Amino acid sequence: MKVEYFESYDVMSKRAAEIIAGELNKKSDMVLGLPTGSTPLGLYANLIEMNKCGEVDFSKVTTFNLDEYYPFKRDDKNSYYKFMFDNFFGKINIDKDRVNIPNGEADDGDVEAAEYEKKLEDCGGLDLMVLGLGANGHIGFNEPEKFLIADTHIAELTENTREQNKRFFDSIDEVPKKALTMGMGSILKAKKILIIITGEAKKEAFKQILEGKITTENPATFLNLHRDVILLTDLKFNLKYEMKEKEREAFEICNFKIEKLNLDMRLTDVKFAPDNSKITFYYINPSNKMLDWGTLVGELRAIFGKQIEVIQVKE
Ligand code: F6R
């Protein structure tokens, strides 16, 4: 996973638009997966501008939206259908016949889900899937659960998600309880994934992605299994600070262990890998004697649960 940090939402949105434009310029008839929500609004605004200036052409692009409330009227002010046309499709040169959004008005939601999945496969699958992140780690409406579902399906919205979405409705009772959503497989089969993360509420879910442990309690952690994910976030500065705190803590723990194991080494620095998969300990070997730090590495691995690297540096 490639993580890019930005100092502002605007710069991040511009970068997201550039990534999509780059892919589009490589393959003008690409199949593009898209989210709704507050996160991609900046991205869509940038793409609309780029389209106006002739920098990107959507005329041959096929799109598949991630989700739609179910059952739900297309012309409801909160439908994802309306959201996409108001904020994006209505303002670019896309061929409306190539726009796919799960049909919230379908009589049979299960049939609609199966047909949507089939259409996605018939189109050759997604070249690029763009995602936002739910505060509870959901992607699309794949909510934290004991198990996740691979294909497009009807999902029950969690209370957390309904709470998050209630800002658009007059009351919580009006927030739908179900939605049609691409499944984890529909998303993870995309050739490339771009996830954009903004907002303090997402911090915990974002940190769990970086930790690299996969859990159905945070569906977005499954992105760690994909080969080509770009993650953009403006949550940079707090995280950097927290990383420093963690490094300080790791330094102290390691020093304590060195003392306990009576090792003749002096710790100089600790660094966490940006994706949090590895911790590197730097040390000086003052007497230049052979050191057996195998036990130390084992103990540190048991504490931190990630790859440990120990590097000798010169005084
Ligand atoms: C929207 C979707 C959701 C949102 C997520 C973040 O189509 O699938 O997973 O991406 O809830 O929403 P915002 O961007 O409003 O914070």
Image: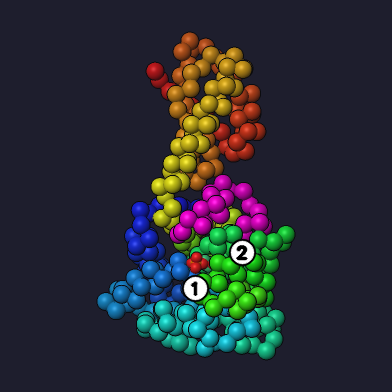
Residue stretch in magenta: 198-219
Between discs 2 and 1, the one toward the N terminus: 1
Distance Cα–Cα, label 2 vs label 1? 18 Å
Q: Name the residue under label 1.
A: 36
Q: Residue furthest front?
A: 171
Q: Are marks 2 and 1 in contact (CB under 8 Å)?
A: no
Q: Which quadrant does the C terminus fall into?
A: top left
* Residue 76 can be seen in this image: yes
Residue at 59 percent across and 39 percent down: it is 306
**30 lies above or below 275:** below
Residue at 54 percent across and 22 percent down: it is 255
Q: Which quarter of the figure has residue 157?
A: bottom right
The x and y percentages for residue 85 are 44, 83
| Residue in front for this viewpoint, 247 or 213 | 247
Task: Give left or right: position of 149 versus 250.
Answer: right
Label annotation for residue 257? none
Q: Residue furthest right?
A: 146
| Residue in front for this viewpoint, 130 or 158 | 158
209 in the magenta segment: yes
Given the image, on which type of amino acid does mark 1 rest?
Thr
Answer few, some or many: residues within 10 Å of disc 2's Cα (few below 14, many 20 plus, some between 14 and 19).
few
Given the image, on which type of amino acid does mark 2 rest?
Asn
Residue at 49 percent across and 71 percent down: it is 37
The x and y percentages for residue 203 are 51, 53
Q: Which quarter of the figure has residue 17?
A: bottom left
Q: Which quarter of the figure has residue 121?
A: bottom right
Q: Mark 2 points at which residue?
A: 160
| Residue in front for this viewpoint, 182 or 255 | 255
Mark 1 CB within 8 Å of ligand 1: yes
Mark 2 CB within 8 Å of ligand 1: no
The x and y percentages for residue 235 are 44, 53
Tag in front: 2 or 1:
2
